[in-house]
Amino acid sequence: MPVSFNSLNLNLIKKVKLIYSDSTYSIKTLIVCNTFFSRLKGMLFSKENHKNAYLIIPCNSIHTFFMGYSIDVVFLNKSGDIVSQFNVDPFKTKSEKEAFAVLEGTRLLKSNNNIVQVVFLC
């Protein structure tokens, strides 16, 4: 069961566990972007790294302008439930009006297996 963002201490979260529809999971190192400049930068100017995931909070839209690679994006509502998930090519935008936070990274999504739950770990 997802946990509300109101009850999370973002300073303590170090990892994120992505649970897929085929009952497999992956664990990524979490980089929290919760200040104006860290949200503005997000993954911009970072090298493609499939070991990290970025939590941009609060956020309900992203862009991939000036990115050299596609990214996977998972929109989450205030309760931590998944609203939608996409692979976004460079120089595109994506938004979700119901979203409160965005989890983004490379190799977050698996073909034919949706993410069914996002669990934040200390």
Image (spheres, rainbow, N blue to C red):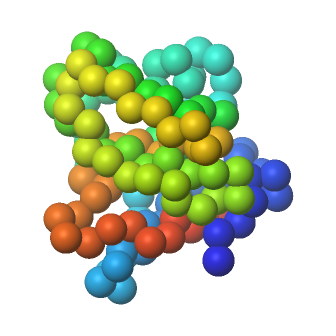
Instruction: Specify whether 19 is left or right of 34.
Output: left
List x then y, in percent, for residue 36.
64, 17
Can you say whether 44 is above or below 87 in the image?
A: above
Q: Eyeballing the image, is 40 above or below 6?
A: above
Quadrant where the C terminus sits is bottom right
Could you tell whether 58 is left or right of 114 in the image? Answer: right
Q: Which residue is at a point 46% across and 33% down the rendered structure image?
A: 95
Depth check: 119 or 52 in front? 119
Residue 75 seen in this snapshot: yes
Q: Residue at x 56, y 67 (%)?
A: 119
Please state the total of marks drawn on the protein image.
0
Q: Is residue 53 visible?
A: no
**Is 27 situated above or below 37?**
below
Compared with 28, 17 (above or below) is below
The quadrant where residue 60 appears: top right
Q: Nearer the viewer, residue 94 or 117?
A: 94
Left or right position of 36 against 70:
right
Q: Position of residue 65 (x, y in %)?
A: 29, 16
Q: Residue at x 17, y 65 (%)?
A: 111
Which residue lies most toward the right here?
A: 7
Asked which quadrant contains residue 48, the reply is top left
Position in image of residue 55 (x %, y %) = 53, 42
Residue 21 at x, y = what percent?
A: 35, 79
Classify residue 116 by image quadrant. Answer: bottom left
